[in-house]
Every structure is written in structure tokens, then in C-alpha cells.
Amino acid sequence: MWTSTDRREGVFHIICEYLSSLDLRYEVNEGLNVVERWNAANDFLCYGRQGIFATNSRAQQEISTLCLQLLQNCLMLINTLLVQRTIEQHQLLDQFSEADRRALTPLFYEHVNPYGLFALDLDQPSFLEAA
């Protein structure tokens, strides 16, 4: 069983390790950047009512949350395919360093238009086929 003294010592140890290790600070900062990017994507996807649930109904909140997760998964899948195809088409994989590979992420949404009209032409190849 942990006592409050043990917890304080553990927290103090973690803080000292964080302050003394530049690599650990970089790693923590990179993780925080990923979380911030994910939160920004959530805000973008839930742009109506600033992402606040408009109901107190638990069932409606659950449906909204599941819809958001579905949108997130679709966006990440499409982005992953776009990045993968771009790398393959331009034969970039051999040029990437280990840091470049770690920096690859599907967490972007600047190409998404949440407000406008979407033209659907079934005679044209999809953007994934054209990419």
C-alpha cells in the first residue's frame, strides 16, 4: 500500500528525472503535441456548438460520441492512405530518417471542407484512385 510520503517521493523522483533529461522533456513535449493536435481535430469535427453536447440524454451523448469516433477513424484511414500513396508515388521512404518516420502522422484535417457542397460524380475516379 502506498502512503502519501511514498507518493510524494515518487512524484519528486519523476520531476527530477524530467528536469534532468532533455530527451525525456522532448519525448513528453512530442506526446503533448499529439494530444493537442487530436483535440484540435475533435474541435474541428464537432464544430457545431463548440463541441458541447446539446442534450442531457445519456443515449444521445453516446450516439454523438460514437459518431465522432467514426468520423475520426474515417479521417485517419483516409489520411493514412493519402500519406502512404504519396510516399510510394514519390519514392520517399528511403530518403526518410528515423526522426522523419516518427514524425509521420495522419492527424491532419486542413484538406477537409465541413461547410461546402460536395460534388459526387460516379464516372470520375475517387480521390484515392487519383492520388
Image: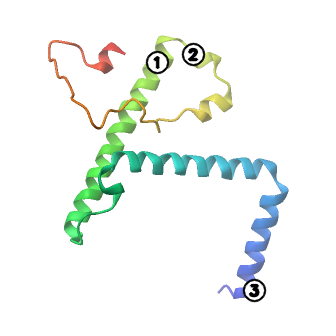
Residues at marks 2 and 1 touching, judged by CB atoms closer than 8 Å: yes
Tell me which amino acid carries mark 3: Thr
Tell me which amino acid carries mark 2: Leu
Measure the alpha-carbon separation of dots 3 and 1: 53 Å
Tell me which amino acid carries mark 1: Thr
The residue closer to the viewer here, 129 or 41, is 41
Q: Where residue 83 sits: x, y (%)?
A: 46, 25
Point out the image quarter for the C terminus: top left
Query: What secondary structure is found at the residue carrying circle 3?
Result: helix
Measure the alpha-carbon separation of dots 2 and 1: 8 Å
* Residue position marked by numbered label 1 in the rendering: 86
* Residue position marked by numbered label 3 in the rendering: 5
Q: Where residue 15 sits: x, y (%)?
A: 77, 66
Would you say 30 lies left or right of 122 here? right
**How many C-alpha atoms fall within 10 Å of the one at disc 1: few (<14), some, or many (≥20)?**
some
- The numbered mark, 2 or 1, whose residue comes first in the sequence reads 1
Query: What secondary structure is found at the residue carrying circle 1?
Result: helix
The relative height of residue 20 versus residue 30 in the rendered view (above or below) is: below
Measure the alpha-carbon separation of dots 3 and 2: 52 Å
**How many C-alpha atoms fall within 10 Å of the one at disc 2: few (<14), some, or many (≥20)?**
few
- Residue 92's disc is 2
Q: Where residue 18 sits: x, y (%)?
A: 77, 59
